Structures are given as structure tokens and as C-alpha cells.
Image (spheres, grey):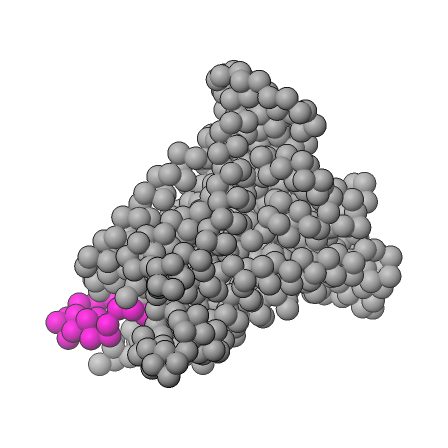
Amino acid sequence: MVSGTARRLFGGVVHAFVLIAFSVLLAFPFYWMLITIFKTTNDLYDLRNNPFKFNEKPTLEHLQLLFHDTLYLRWVGNTAFVGAVVVLITLLLAVPGAYALARLTGRWGERLGIGIFLTYLVPPTLLFIPLARLVAILGLQDSLWSLIVVYPSFTVPFSIWLLMGFFKSIPRELEDAAMVDGLTRFGAFIKLVVPISVSGILTVVIFSFTLVTQEFGYALTFISSKSHQMVGVGVPIFLVRGDVYYWGSLMAACLITSLPIALLYNVFLDRFIAGFTVGAVK
Amino acid sequence: MTNRKLGVLMFSPAIIYVLAVVGVPFVLAFIYAVGDVKIASVGYHYVGLANFRSVLQSPTFRRSLYDSIVFTIGTQIVVLVGSTILALALKDRFTGRGFIRFLILLPWVAPVSLGTIGWKWILDSIYSVINWVLIHLHFVKPFDTPMWLGDPTLAMLSVIGVESWRLLPFSTVILLAGLTAIPRDIPEAAAVDGAGFWRTLFRITIPMILPIVSVAILFGVIFVFTDMTVVYILTRGGPYDTTQVLPSLAFFTGILGSDLAEGAAISIFLVPILVAVAYFMLRVASRSEVG
């Protein structure tokens, strides 16, 4: 029995060690951002200093620089605007589309659903070259509208896939009962199915919005002027002046943008993962 | 109105939109690759396989193809091993699991370009904190520190490391979904029969989560093989194109070099992998439908 206890203790230690090691490894860059934000420039660039502690008094200079002397807030605004419009377009296309494929078109709809999901696998890095020319032809170069037109290409397929699973889990009897009570099929969809699917729809909202904030390739390709940037491109590319990296402000922008997105995403992650694993887990 | 008609009416806007913004450019990518389009040109002339010929002769392209393969496979190995260990550690409930989960997920849920710029600071040529630690542990001498992004081998290891850092949480939660779906009584029965931790792991757990592991690998391959963000921000493909991958090369050639035709030809080389992944994906999907 002694060996059993020792074994369990050993297992516990290994378990704790694995968790701590991975947490440190994965979260370290964000901790490093946090420390960097409040260090004075002298402190950051003195090689004799221990980088893990504050060798000089913490400062707010980097935050002031970020908020007063850069376009950071403008980029956040651009991102919020594009995100909001893309979410709206995604909902208008994906909610009815997913319902139709889940309920009204039988096996055929199922196949079409898988087909749509496969388009999610076509990467931006294959499409951005032809799209760059299409955007130029439409006269949308350097306009946020170019992103608004293109981003639904990846938010719609995945949202349809997620919502199809969601709608299938609603008992058919509910809609049948509503239709017996005199609603049309479409009326039942609007008045019954949509309201009880609020949590699924909310998942799509959060998911689409976070995807927009994470996108990099299209924003880098289509947007050229500094003031029209999205936050994900503006910060890493345009906050650098020439070859000079303002690490303090840069890290502040990264952390301040990442944390709210991470928190939002985290809340809805389980549903999101369910979308990826449909078919492989029952 | 019949169900079918209403259905067609409800899903056609979505299908048409997706066809317009994915289907059309997908086809155009092939058309451009066999033509002579520049970013501002108006005409189009068919040039056959000339672009592919010039691409295949370019040493930069061959290097990028090789780098892409190393980058993708290297990342998959790190991620697969790491996420399997981490998912096993996270499987059972314990105090603080929610918080640990949040920390572990950060790299995946934060915007990729911003997380990567954090790494650029950590791997800085002069102020790298890693180098500071290495110096103080007396592993390296001051003024002779590793150039993480300046040395070809280290730069490749760095981009693989950062891409793995980014993908590990995603793979972990997918595997976790597979692990929690294993009925509890199966490992318990194995324990009663005298199977230890390793025996249960290799004989029961791993075989049972194989389908979901394949899902994690398929998505992982797609994400890594087609990603240009990490490379673009960390190294811009340097030093001397030793970390250049196909997506970043397509960007530099097609967009910055405004040679759309050649850029398109480069990105076409992504397609075979995508087709292979889509094929395996469909097989996984249909197998679980039957079983």
C-alpha cells in the first residue's frame, strides 16, 4: 500500500509539473507584454538590468504615447466597424441558409452543407491574389469596404456549419405544433426557431467578430494607407517607425487588444470546438 | 410554398455569396497562373505553363517549397506531442482548471499577428530575455548570444516554435473533446483488469481518440501550410529566404512585386495539399456517419 501512495503522489507531482510548465510556456509572452508596458525606455534598453524586475520606477509613458500619438484608437475603431458589418452580413446569410440546409432540403442539403464547410478550407493565401485584382476593379482598394465584402467568405461557411448542428438539435415537433397553430413554415422559423436559437446565434456573432479581429493577410493586401488599417495589421506594421520598434507601446497595443478578444472567445470556445469535431465525436 | 422551394430561397443568398467570394477567385487563381496579369494591367494573354516553368526554375521557390514542408511537419510534430500530453493533464477536473485553461488558450484566442510581435520582442537580437537567461545560466557568453531570427537554422526553429505555440491550444481542446467522449467505464474496467497508466494509454485511450487526432492533424496541416502571418512578422522570410514559405513568397511576388500571374502560380502549389486534406476530412466524416 505504501508503494500505491507513493505512486499517487508521484503522479500528482508530474501532473502539476506538466500543467505549470505548459501554462508558463503558453502564457509567458503575455506576461512579458505586461511587464514591458510599464518599464521606462532606459530600463528596457540597459543590458545590465535584470529584465524580470523593475529597475526603475514603473511608467505610463508608453501608454500615453500609444493613446495620444499613434493611430491605435482609430485602428480599433476601424476593426469594430468592419467587425460589426461583417457580423450583420454573416447573420443575414448564415441563419436562414443553415436552417434551410438543416431542415428543408433533406440529405441533399446535408451534402451541400459539407460542401460549404469545405470552402472554409480554401485559404486566404490562395485567394488574395485574384481578390486583390477584383478589389481593384471594384474600386475598393484601400477601403474598409473591401474587407467587409471579403471577410464573409470565411465567416459564412463556418457559421452555417455551426448553426446547422444547432438547428438539428431543435425538436421538429415544436415547429410542427407552431404550424398547426396557423404559422407558415417561414413564420415558424422567424417567430419560434430564431428566438430559441439565441445562444447559437450569439456564438456565431462572437465567432465571426473574433475571426475578423484575427485576420491578417487580406488586411495587409487590400489596405495601404495608415489611417485605414485594422488593428491586427496597424500595430505590427505601422507602429514600427522605420526600423525603430517602440516596444513599450507595441506591447501595450498587443495586450490591450488581445485580452478582451481572448476573454470573449474563451466563453464560447466549447461550441466553437464542437463545430470542428462534428463527425469525429459522438 | 413547398419546403423545398422555401429552402432553396433561404440558402441561395449564402451559396451565391460564397461562390462569388471563394469560388470565383479560386477559379481565377488558376486562370491567372496561366496568364500574364500584373496588378494594374487590363489585358490577359494565355501563356500556358510559362509561369510554372519560371517558378520551378527559381531557387527561391524551391527553397520555399522545402521550407514550407519543414515548417508544416516540424510544427505538427511539436503540436501533436505537446497537445497530447497537455490534453491528458487537463482531462480530469481539478481546482483552478478554468483559470489554467484560460492561460493555455491565450495563444490561440489572441490575434495571431499581435502574439507574434510579442515573440519578436522576446527573440530580439539584443534585448532577448531568453538570451539574458542563457547568459546568467552560463550556457552562452555575453556578446556571443544566439541570433534567434538572424541565423538560418535558429530562424526556422523560431518560426516553428511560435507557430506551435499558436496552434497547441487549438489541438489540445480538440483532443480534450475526444478524451472526454470516452465512456468512463472503459478505462475503469481496464484498471480493474490490472492495466497500468501506460498500458491504458497506448491500448485504450490513444486508439479511441485516433479519429479526433486525425481531425486535429488535418486542420493543423491546413492552418500551418497556408499561414503567412508568423513568418511575415518574425522574419519576412529571411535570413536569405531560409524561412520563406509558399504563402509568404506568393505575397511578396504577387502583391508587393505586383506580378499577379507568378504569385498565383506559386499559390497553386498549395492546392494538392488542400485537396488531400479535404479528401481525408470527408472520409472521417463519412466513416462516423456509418459507424
Please determine whether, in this image, residue B88 is positioned above or below residue B242. below
Where is the C terminus of chain A found, in terms of image quarters? bottom left
Please name whichever residue, B261 or B155, is drawn nearer the observer in this view of the structure.
Answer: B261
Point out the stretch of residues depicted in magenta. Answer: B180-197
Pinpoint residue A170: horizontal percent, then vertical percent.
36, 75
Please name whichever residue, A48 or A41, is drawn nearer the observer in this view of the structure.
Answer: A41
Where is the N terminus of chain A found, in terms of image quarters? bottom left
Please name whichever residue, A5 or A153, is drawn nearer the observer in this view of the structure.
Answer: A153
Q: Residue furthest bottom?
A: A181
Q: Which residue appears at 32% of the width and 43% of the height?
A: B279
Please determine whether, in this image, residue B51 is positioned above or below residue A114. above
Place residue A129 in its image quadrant. top right
Place residue A18 in its image quadrant. bottom left
Q: Which residue appears at 49% of the width and 16% of the height?
A: B48
Q: Which residue appears at 51% of the width and 38% of the height?
A: B24
Q: Residue furthest right?
A: A69
Residue B189 is one of the magenta-drawn residues: yes
Pinpoint residue A82: horizontal percent, then vertical percent.
67, 57
Q: Is any part of residue B286 visible from this angle?
A: yes
Pinpoint residue B286: horizontal percent, then vertical percent.
25, 52
Pinpoint residue A268: horizontal percent, then vertical percent.
50, 70
Answer with left or right where residue B222 lies relative to residue B111: left
Residue A37 is one of the magenta-drawn residues: no
Answer with left or right where residue B117 lies relative to residue A196: right
Answer with left or right where residue B169 lies relative to residue A215: left
Q: Residue furthest front?
A: B1
Please name whichever residue, B225 or B82, is drawn nearer the observer in this view of the structure.
Answer: B225
